[in-house]
Image (tube, rainbow, N blue to C red):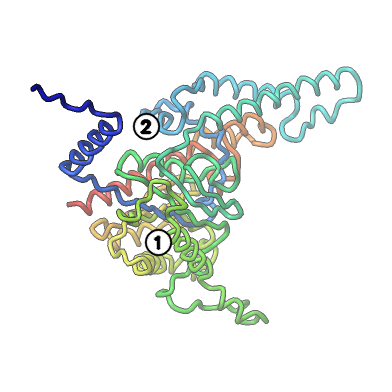
Amino acid sequence: MKQTLPRPTLTNLVRIVRAAAVASLMTMPSIAAEPLKVFILAGQSNMVGHARAHTIATLYASDRPRDKELLQLVIQSDSNLSKGILEEQLARGRELDQLTGGISNSKIKAMEDGPEKTALQAESKEFKDAHEAYKKSVASACVVSDRVFINSIADGNKRAGKLGIGYGGARDKIGPEYAFGLSIANKVDGPILLIKTSWGGKSLNYNFRPPSAGAYTLNEKEQASDKVDEIKGNAGLNYRMMNEAIRKVLDNLAENHPAYDADAGYKISGFVWFQGFNDQFSPEFRDNYKDNMIAFINDVRKEYKTPEMPFVIGVLGTGVTAEKVAENQVSVGQREAAKAMGAENYVSSVESYTEYSQFSNNIFQKGWPEHYHEWDTVGSDRPYHYLGSGAFFVRLGDAFANSMAELIATQGK
């Protein structure tokens, strides 16, 4: 008699498929998750970042190949922005300034009330509305990363999430973190988290004073104060606040990056320092900068048990020219600290003056109040904040990432 085999049921088929899948997985080599790469950024107001996002479009004014590449890095590919649109906006800004007299609206204010003044006010409003719409269009075209996340303290602007614009001094501003994160993502594998701690108006000699620099020396005025104990106690306060903020993030990595795998862990892959303005104005502060910087690097590495942590120092470049920057003892101290420790010890310096937006500076020098709307297209702050130029901060962030990647590559040799 011919034996009839039972027909497989749907349940049995599912079991067979599952068993085959499990057997297949067991024979495949396991793919380990990538450790989370953590980069720390710290400093004062120019690490905070005071460039409004729309000024990033100043890069369209440049024909340099690198600037064209940076536009591809930070502006979405489907954007309709272009050099022509920037030039049109600048022309409209010049026309508006001629009509109104610039930021003061002096020409309109000087007119007698009447139809002519009313018509000019309406015309200038139309121009201004179009100018604001342009600025919003640039900001909305900026790239937001799905791979790089950030936890940031930028003065009072404390935020965490996907890396995009808005992690500078306000929700529409950037610092060097923006292009740094996007650029470093093209150079290293795995998920990336940036931790940024920055406060404006702080010195290395006092506010960020590292422990191994020793006790802070009070000047005569401070010694005569009735707050001697308070002054002593606050020495190094921002150094301590920095580490407290970093530790808090490291203790909660799953909340700060969705791709964090506890089994794979994390690695502190580098540190970027951009500071120095407030150390310029005292002989003790500026003359000790080199030694303080070296102490800071050594103490940070000790704090996080990473003796070979790559460390990039941004050299203060608000002097704009090579000659002026070379006269600044803080800038010299930053260079000397990097040279003393050396690339072989995974420390480098990056010049900031070379990334300056000369295009923005030329308009600023025309007299920004009278040329306000033209100026506002390409800059958003004063010279000590690198004119609040998005072009500058994108270039600088990329330069930091390039230097960081070189140090990381050196570690692998």
Q: Total marks drawn?
A: 2
Label 1 vs label 2, nearer the camera: 2
Query: From the viewer's perspective, is residue 413 above or below residue 362?
Result: below
**Residue at figure coordinates x 74%, y 29% from the top left:** 101
Question: On the image, numbered disc 1 is attached to which residue?
Answer: 333
Which amino acid, mark 2?
Arg
* Residue 321, x across and y down, in percent: 45, 45
Classify residue 4 by image quadrant.
top left
Q: Residue furthest front?
A: 1
Report the side of 348 relative to 409 (left or right): right
Q: Quadrant of the N terminus?
A: top left
Residue assigned mark 2: 66
Q: Who is closer to the viewer here, 155 or 362?
A: 155
Res 366 → quadrant: top right
Which residue is more in the foreground, 145 or 390?
145
- Categorize mark 2 by other alpha carbons within 10 Å: few (<14), some (14-19), many (20+): few
70 relative to 283, above or below: above
- Near mark 1 (Cα within 10 A), the count class, few <14, some 14-19 or many ≥20, is many
Give me the residue at 23% from left, 37% from top. 21
The amino acid type of the residue labelled 1 equals Gly
Q: Position of residue 186 (x, y in %)?
A: 33, 38
The residue positioned farthest toward the left in the image shown: 1
